[in-house]
Image (cartoon, helix red, strand yellow):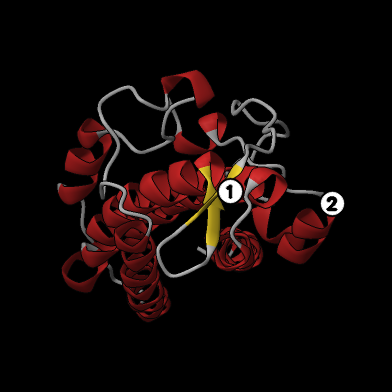
């Protein structure tokens, strides 16, 4: 299934305007679909961490899921350094890797402070929609590509991947109790939305 067909973030008219006419003429590019498969979030009671900060179940779920999601994203973008033909694609990939590596470090620190495991038990978040992600089959297929073919497949995959990050970030913004976690979620929403607009434009120029 094409990556963007399954993309589910709530990207509004502003994103489509930002992408402009870059989508036109690209046979494999479809704007992310409206709607989310993650159910509406509800605010859970807050707990006080040993350092005095507060957090709730939504903060823990967001952080555990996003750390894992970022790890997969880093795996994807690292492929660009040796397979991409476009300097712009390589630059974007390096920026994504640096940003997400720093975010993982920050979120992992929160989990240690909250005395929560770095990753959730299998299926623990299934009732909340599970963790959106890219399949290992898709990543293996991407590894087999090079040059222009890689660039287009990479951008399509990364758009879908960042789309999923937006979903999780918006769920955290709606239900989280920890100010740092909800603040990061807002920044992730904004930055990944901008990245998707940039990548849609790059695909239109291909």
**Could you say which is closer to the camera, residue 167 or residue 113?**
113
Is residue 28 rendered to the left or right of residue 139?
Answer: right
| Circle 1/circle 2 CB separation < 8 Å | no
Residue name at image x 32 percent, y 22 percent: 123
The disc placed on residue 167 is none
Q: Residue at x 67, y 52 (%)?
A: 173
Q: Write down the quadrant of residue 175 in the picture.
A: top right
Give whichever of 184, 52 is nearer the camera.
52
Q: Is residue 205 above or below residue 124?
A: below
Residue 23 visible = yes
The answer to whether residue 157 is visible is no
Report x, y in % for residue 184. Answer: 56, 66
Residue placed under numbered mark 2 in the picture? 13
Q: Quadrant of the N terminus?
A: top left
Q: Which residue is mark 1?
A: 26
* Front label number (1 vs 2): 2
Marks 1 and 2, how far apart at CA: 19 Å
**How many other residues sit within 10 Å of disc 1, few (<14), some (14-19) or many (≥20)?**
few
Q: Earlier in the sequence, mark 1 or mark 2?
A: 2
Please give left or right for residue 83 compared with residue 59 in the image: left
- Name the spot of residue 148 as percent of width and height, x first: 33, 60
User: In the image, residue 61 lies at what x, y percent?
Assistant: 45, 41
Name the element at disc 2. helix
Label 1 SS: loop
User: Does 165 sit above or below residue 19?
Assistant: above
Is residue 123 placed above or below 143 in the rendered structure? above
What's the residue at 54%, 66% (across, down)? 202
């Amino acid at each position: 299934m094409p990556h963007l067909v399954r993309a589910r973030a709530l990207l509004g008219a502003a994103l489509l305007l930002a992408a402009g006419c870059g989508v036109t003429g690209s046979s494999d590019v479809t704007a992310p679909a409206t709607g989310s498969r993650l159910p509406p979030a509800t605010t859970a009671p807050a707990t006080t961490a040993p350092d005095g900060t507060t957090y709730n179940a939504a903060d823990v779920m967001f952080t555990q899921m996003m750390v894992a999601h970022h790890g997969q994203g880093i795996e994807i973008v690292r492929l660009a350094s040796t397979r991409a033909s476009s300097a712009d694609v390589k630059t974007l990939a390096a920026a994504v890797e640096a940003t997400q590596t720093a975010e993982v470090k920050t979120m992992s620190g929160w989990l240690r402070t909250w005395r929560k495991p770095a990753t959730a038990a299998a299926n623990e978040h299934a009732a909340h929609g599970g963790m959106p992600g890219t399949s290992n089959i898709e990543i293996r297929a991407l590894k087999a590509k090079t040059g222009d073919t890689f660039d287009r497949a990479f951008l399509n995959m990364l758009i879908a991947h960042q789309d999923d990050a937006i979903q999780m970030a918006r769920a955290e913004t709606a239900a989280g109790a920890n100010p740092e976690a909800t603040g990061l979620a807002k920044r992730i929403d904004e930055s990944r939305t901008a990245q998707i607009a940039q990548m849609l434009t790059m695909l239109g120029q291909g």
